Every structure is written in structure tokens, then in C-alpha cells.
Amino acid sequence: MAQLAGGAGEGLACSQAGLPAASATREFRDAFAARYGPTQLYAAYFYDATNVVIDAMRRADSADPARFGPRIRDTSLEGATGHVAFDAKGDRRDAEMTIFRLRGGGIVPVAIVKEGALAPYRP
């Protein structure tokens, strides 16, 4: 986007589900970087999602999706992206949205929306 818009895109705002990769736990970022390089945008979310499935399988004592699938909604664990739990609809509780701005040719996180409130982004 920054390359296509050039200078005309300066100040452009966009939103994206979740938090920036730099907001993942230090432990996750260090382990990821040691194996794969710099942390990618959704890497911590994929890691947490995998752990949600593993946790549900353990609690169901089964790898059968029909048995462990319903247990996913009962998940409550601390992950690389914070506390992971789901509401009655299956949406993640307390999920964040990040507001970015195009600045100096790069996309920079500037604010976080959580529980309907907007706050400045602080890494």
C-alpha cells in the first residue's frame, strides 16, 4: 500500500484485527526469532490458535473434531497474545483492533481499540 500510494498515502488510516507483532510476549518473540527470524504479523495468533486446539483435544481426551470441537469454547489459557477465552458466540473475549497510519513510507501502529475504548498504542 505504501509503495502504491507513495506520498499521497501519507497519514492514511486503516484498522486491523489484533495487536502488532511487537505486542506478543517476549518469550514468544524470542523463540520465534531464534527459529524463523523477525516475528510476523499474525504468528503469535496462529501459535495461540494451535494451543487452543491442543488444549481442547487434551480436555476432550480425543483428536476427533466432533469431540474436541465443542470444548474450544471452554478454553481459558494464557497465550502469546494475552488471555485467550471465548464468548457464547465463539468470538474471542476482549479482542483488540489496531489502528495504523501510513507515516514516512511505513505503516505504524498508533492506537488500540479494546472493549469499545480507544487508547494510544504503547509497545
Image (tube, rainbow, N blue to C red):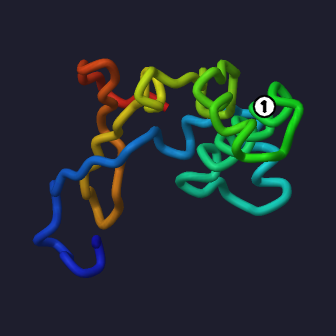
Pick out the residue farthest to the left.
8
Image quarter for residue 112?
Answer: top left
**Whole-percent x, y for residue 11 in the image:** 16, 54
State whether residue 6 is above or below residue 73.
below
Q: Is residue 78 left or right of residue 93?
A: right
User: Who is closer to the viewer here, 45 or 4?
Assistant: 45
Residue drawn at the location 55% of the way across and 46% of the way down: 21
Q: What residue is at 60 percent from the left and 57 percent from the top?
A: 40
Q: Quadrant of residue 55?
A: top right
Outermost residue on the front side: it is: 66
Helix, strand or loop at disc 1?
helix
In the foreground, 66 or 5 = 66
Looking at the picture, how far across and down is residue 68, in whole percent?
73, 36
Closer-to-camera residue (109/17): 17
Left/right placement of residue 101 relative to residue 56 reads left
The mark total stands at 1
Q: Residues within 10 Å of mark 1 (few under 14, many from 20)?
A: some
- Where does the image place residue 2, in percent across and percent down from the top left? 28, 71
Query: Where does the image place residue 41, in percent across and percent down from the top left?
Result: 53, 54
- Residue at 69% over, 21% down: 77
Q: Which residue is mark 1?
A: 55
Q: Residue at x 81, y 29 (%)?
A: 60
Q: Amino acid at mark 1?
A: Asp
In the depicted structure, whether residue 62 falls above or below residue 59:
below
Q: Is residue 34 above or below residue 61?
A: below
Q: Say left or right for 57 vs 1.
A: right
- The N terminus lies in quadrant: bottom left
Left or right side of 83 for 102: left
